[in-house]
Image (cartoon, rainbow, N blue to C red):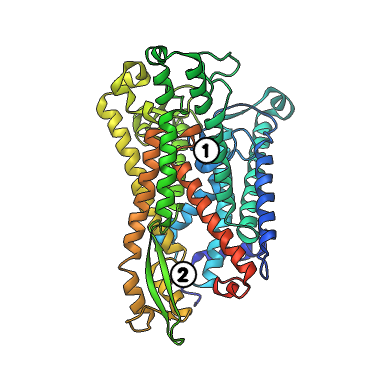
Amino acid sequence: MTEERKSLLYKLEPLIKRFPAVTKPEGHVHFRTKLLWSFACLLAYFVLSNVFIYGLGSELDVFSSFRAILAGQSGSLVHLGIGPIVTGSIIMQLFVGAKIIKLDLQNSEDKAIYQGAQKILVIVMIFVEAIPQVFGFLAPDKVALAKFGVFGARSLIVLQLAVGSWIVFLMDEVVSKWGLGSGISLFIVAGVAQSVFTGLISWIPQTAGSPLSISNPPGGVLPKAFYFLSSMSAPQFITQGGFEKLFVGANANDHNTIAALIATLTTFFVVVYAESSRIELPLAHGRVRGARGRYPIRLLYASNIPVILAGALLANVNLIGLMLWTGPLHGMPFLGHKLWVGGYQEGSTTAVTGIAYYFSQVNGLSNWLLPFISQSYSGLFLQRAAWQILLHVFAYSAFMIGGSIIFAIFWIETTNMGPDQVAKQIEGSGMQIPGFRRDPRVTAKILERYIPVVTVIGGAAVGCLAVFADLIGTLGNASGTGILLAVGILQRLYEQIAKEQAMEMHPVLRGFFGEG
């Protein structure tokens, strides 16, 4: 590549070369070693999520509705979760996909610059997300204020958030290069599994500190069902609200219901089925007669990555809305503290008015359907017309489905999964589609009949699944996106473990799978 054609990002090359990074393994990493590194990083992540920020007083978790996607633990060193990593990835994908940054990701030099620039952008995004939260939603306690002053105490919290996020980023690199799957995927699965497990079997009352009662049943759906059925007769179960509380919830904060359990299980089975659905193109070796194979094009071709990116983008929209309402941007002319932009109740991170409300997450039946059935569920909905509630559902659904489609298209183009790149991979392996000339351009034209269509359908499918589960509700408030991600990640992880075990048993397969 000539100097004239090089991207401006090459000016960052001296910094990228000196940037700390996890080195790639030079040869094959044994399965046990990969398993050990993955387990160690997962354990370290749980430890970090239980180490709370020193000097932190009151807190408002602006990402409370998106914890299943962004992982992390409110008030801990991993308070930001994987947010900076995902946001940095979104920005780089958009810039490369829109040709604002001119890089050919098939070129090894360009790809190295792309990955290096993304690391620098992640560092920037750590501070972009940490500083507004500390100066708007994470207040220092009195001890820290007395020791370090206002600016010093806030700077200390920002530093801890930055260190925690940087460790998460490094652990993601360790898992990607030395472990199984990716660190981001493991952290998401861990958070979702914890939420679902708690929502299923927790015996702790819904109002902690108060004794168990009909109005304060256990939080988990199974203990709740056992408590109602053992404490109430059949007529009481119907007339005193037991049936209602068990199946649809007593209020907007009651997410552990039979309806949520059904939605969680439905999403699980549909995702498993969708992950196994594929189109298989027949292949034949160009030189070895009788050597045949198949190239699978999955229904969920871009996997669950698009819905992660769409959800992360929505979380950042919510963050901006909060900053404009009560955060450091509330004084901004025309946009600051305006109801039409987004209004929030004190102590809440969910918008109740304005544009931010219409694009906020729909969180179960009590958030949209039940107010039409009973006034007891209305609450804030008494201030809204029916068309406003329906517009909220439509706007959120359109954002998630449309965003998933767009990010699916960008994802396959930036990860060498497009028709042209796949055709070159097939050509490089010595294979060809029977009945057609062995030429990457011919193969690419055939793949263009399938890959773009499947990409759009798959992106729409993951978006629809996430929206469906969010509309019904999920156990532990894990969100539809969280359940979708966890199931997809676990299935891909199972497939990778099977592949790793096959390579351990038959080392000749390492070359076929591109392993050293």
| Res 220 label | none
Residue depicted at x 46% and y 69%: 104
Near-viewer residue (65 or 208): 208
Report x, y in % for residue 228: 48, 18
Which of marks 2 and 1 precedes in the sequence? 1
Residue depicted at x 33% and y 41%: 397
Check the image and report above or below for 425 versus 370. Answer: below
Report x, y in % for residue 372: 28, 23
| Res 67 label | 1
Report x, y in % for residue 101: 45, 62
Horizontal side of residue 211 vs 316, given as left or right: right
Residue depicted at x 32% and y 74%: 445
Task: Tell me the element at label 1.
Answer: helix
Is the Cβ of the residue at disc 1 closer than 8 Å to that at disc 2?
A: no
Horizontal side of residue 44 vs 95, given as left or right: right
The residue that label 2 is drawn on is 104
Q: Quadrant of residue 443?
A: bottom left
**One can see residue 296 in this view:** yes
How many numbered marks are there? 2
- Looking at the rendered structure, the kind of residue marked 1 is Arg
Mark 1 is surrounded, within 10 Å at the Cα level, by few (under 14), some (14 to 19) or many (20 or more) other residues, namely: many
